[in-house]
Image (cartoon, coloured by chain):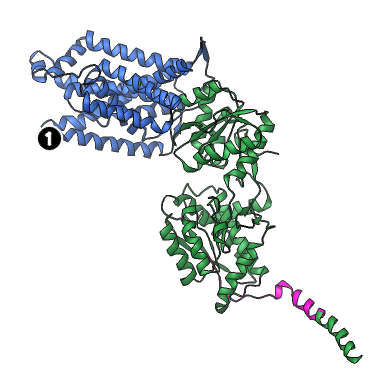
Amino acid sequence: MFFQQLINGLMLGSTYSLIAIGYTLVLGLLQMINLAHGDVFMVGAFLGLTFAYLGIPLYLSLILAMVGAGIMGILVERFCFRPLKKAHFLGPLVSTIAFGILLQNVGTQIWGSEPSRYPQTAEIAQFHLGPVVVSSIQIIILITSLALMAGLDMFIRRTRMGRAMRATSEGQVNASLLGVDPDRVISFTFFSSGALAGVAGVLTALVYLQITPFIGIRQGLIGIVAMVIGGLGNVRGAMIAGLLLGIIEVMNDAYFTAGYRDIIIFGIFFIFIVFKPEGLFGAFKKET
Amino acid sequence: MERKMRNWMALPICVFFLALFISVPSSAQTIAGPEIRIGAALCISGHGANVGKREAIGTQAAIDVINAEGGVYGVPLKLYLEDTASHPGEAVTVVRKLTGDHKVLAIVGPHYSSEAEATFPLGNLLKIVQICVASSKPGLSAANRPYAFRNTLTEDKIGDAVVKEFKKRYNIKKVAIIADIKDAVSKSVGTGVLPAAYKANGIEVITGDSPVTFLTNDAQFMAQITKLKAMNPDGIGMGALGPDALNIITEARRQGMKQPFMSTAPIMEGNIAEIGGKAVEGTLSGTIWHMSVATPASKKFIEAYQKRQKTMYTSEYTEMPDYYPVNAYDAVFMIVEAIKKKRVTNKPGDLAADRAKIMEYLTTLRDFKGVASRGFNEVGDGIKDVIVFEIKGGQWGPVK
């Protein structure tokens, strides 16, 4: 049963990782936290749901939800960050909270506040791997999220755009002196951040049996916890911390009682903030 | 001799007058008017607002039906509805107001056990009947004789009936229990009602006194189901609300579990049967009344409820009646039966006597024929039939 629970934990954790990466990308670039991120994730989940009801195949709805949530990410940047460049440093933070509430309420108007359910998909195939049973949905979720995380890691390290992102996060002025357009890089980063949240949304809608317009609140908080544990601005750290949190949550439900779940997760968060603020894998530091 | 003769004649004369007295045809009976006042102390606002509004509609629907048939001996009933705000303190004020200001004959309500704990002793002090429509905390009516009544059935009676059917239908020998530890009713079903019912029916409870746990509105149940699956029970008992029960069963089927599930009345709220598909087929539950009960009395209630709902507290949460408004509806009919049988005069001067007559009648009422009510037992709690339901073809239907 332990290995089965480990698979459950990885599945849940992979969606947390995708959300945490979105936070950490923006934080690494702007040293600001995007508190509308959880709600961008929610929009992704509902886009996936809507496409599924329209009969669009899963891979296509994943791509469409990615693009949709990515565009939502760009909108967050345009409305909450760009106009407030010279404002007080808390300005963007507050405006992202407002944007998130806006998304929740628009979501409630469109999809209602009652839980929406993913349509009954075709028979789910079960695969037996030794003592562990894995379903087709579980395989899709694990492969998609792990592939995306690996792809993003490669992208940041190997491509021109990835290099530009790293350069911009080290210093916008220097980067622009070297021929990088910071605005373009920032927009692109918000797009990627939103797109990952969108994928996480669709995958969550598959794992979770129901979603509401308020699902982004807890998921968003867990994403922040994962970001802190992984080290602020550390993309690989966020991936691993997300997976760890998923496993912790599942193991708690499996071996303890559900009532301790959030006490443990947010207790860990508190311990890290106080005693190890750089996280497990070291926080990103801006070079001066 | 002459004196003996007189005595002998006195007997038939007495019998004659007595017979005359008893056999007064009911049409000749009268009651003072202009109106017969029925009180209702229900939670129209606060956390019980949705169910309170449904109960208010149920109460008014009963009055509609009675008035459409000419009221009581031609005098119409009138509802005096006051809002307890789901709060014990407010409920006390409301009961005082209904008794003292509105001078009602009896009160339908309140809803919650916490409200009834405050208003039942007051009812005894003011000498007025209250018929609570939801409270199921043990011993509450027994502690407040003689004016406190509860037209409800506790979950343990329902649990036992469902467990019996579950055992028979699926040949259950050992079960596992999963319980919501955040919701009070679900917790008591999962940790108290079901374990006791299983033990009483000779079924082994694998989870013992510590069921597999989750919290209300949890969005995924992967860990819990993996755990339940490893126990390999013959069936699973749930202490859960409708939406969570649906997700639990769906996840179980996803992980390849084929065992049957059962629970009590709360899972029948919501649309688990309609949207659960193949996964939930064969799930058992039990309750005292459900929309699918097709007796003439039940149909008449649904019709009256839906007619009244069009003009009273219109909202999506009041469209479908559940068993709470049925309890309120039946309570009004019980009060009216008491008024008729006990010859309540409804004269202002007789108010205290009239209220006492209603109490006396309800105390011995055991064979009432309501939509889902049979009267009250010796401690003032409802007598009701439990109907065991199963999901069949995407709908809850009574088990034959």
Vertical arrangement, residue B79 with respect to residue A169, above or below? below
Give the color of chain B as drawn: green
Say which amino acid is labelled 1. His
**Residue furthest top as drawn:** A158
Residue found 18% across the figure and 30% down from its top: A81
Vertical arrangement, residue B21 with respect to residue B239, above or below? below
Report if residue A225 is visible in the image. yes
Residue found 30% across the figure and 20% down from its top: A241
On whether residue A154 falls in the magenta region, the answer is no
Secondary structure state at the residue bearing disc 1: loop
Q: Nearer the viewer, residue B198 or A246?
A: B198
Vertical arrangement, residue B359 with respect to residue A94, above or below? below
Report if residue A40 is visible in the image. no
Residue B140 in the figure: left or right of residue A212:
right
Where's residue B54, x and y in %? 51, 52
Chain given the colour blue: A
Residue placed under numbered mark 1 in the picture? A88
Residue A259 in the figure: left or right of residue B162:
left
Quadrant including the N terminus of chain B: bottom right
Quarter of the figure with residue B37 = bottom right
Quadrant including the C terminus of chain B: top right
Where's residue B220, x and y in %? 44, 28
Chain that bears disc 1: A
Q: Nearer the viewer, residue A124 or A220?
A: A220
Residue B83 in the figure: left or right of residue B291:
left
First to last magenta residue range: B15-38
Residue found 18% across the figure and 28% down from its top: A32
